[in-house]
Image: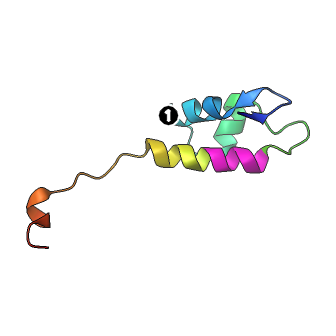
Amino acid sequence: MYVCVCHAVTDRDISAAVAQGCGNLRELRQQLGFGTCCGRCNSCARKVMTESMHAHAPHPRIDAARCVGA
């Protein structure tokens, strides 16, 4: 889906940038160039970035021994 029509930035572009290490909206804007024309995309870009950060976050390892008898 297009997040920024003005610069043709998609949710996949944002997800890929997050996977490569973009950690905040400012870094994302610098890398992808969205949000500089009309600005309507900023809230959607933030939402996609947050969802992507959660999807790419390392999942804690569950210690099975601690779960026994819990």
- Whether 2 is among the magenta residues is no
Q: Which quarter shows the C terminus?
A: bottom left
Residue 64, relative to residue 31: is it above or below? below
Q: Amino acid at mark 1?
A: Ala
Q: Residue furthest bottom?
A: 70
Q: Residue at x 61, y 30 (%)?
A: 12
Q: Secondary structure at mark 1?
A: helix
Q: 33 or 64, which is in the foreground?
A: 64
Q: Residue at x 71, y 44 (%)?
A: 45
Whether residue 28 is visible: yes
Q: 35 or 5, which is in the foreground?
A: 5
Mark 1 crowdedness (10 Å alpha carbons): few <14, some 14-19, many ≥20: some
Q: Which residues are magenta?
A: 42-48
Q: Position of residue 28 (x, y in %)?
A: 66, 37
Q: 62 or 17, which is in the foreground?
A: 62
What number of labels is visible?
Answer: 1
Residue 1 lies in quadrant = top right
Horizontal relation, residue 27 to residue 21: left or right: right
Q: 67 or 13, which is in the foreground?
A: 67
Q: Position of residue 3 (x, y in %)?
A: 75, 37
Residue under label 1, please give it: 19
Horizontal relation, residue 60 to residue 26: left or right: left
Q: Position of residue 18 (x, y in %)?
A: 55, 37
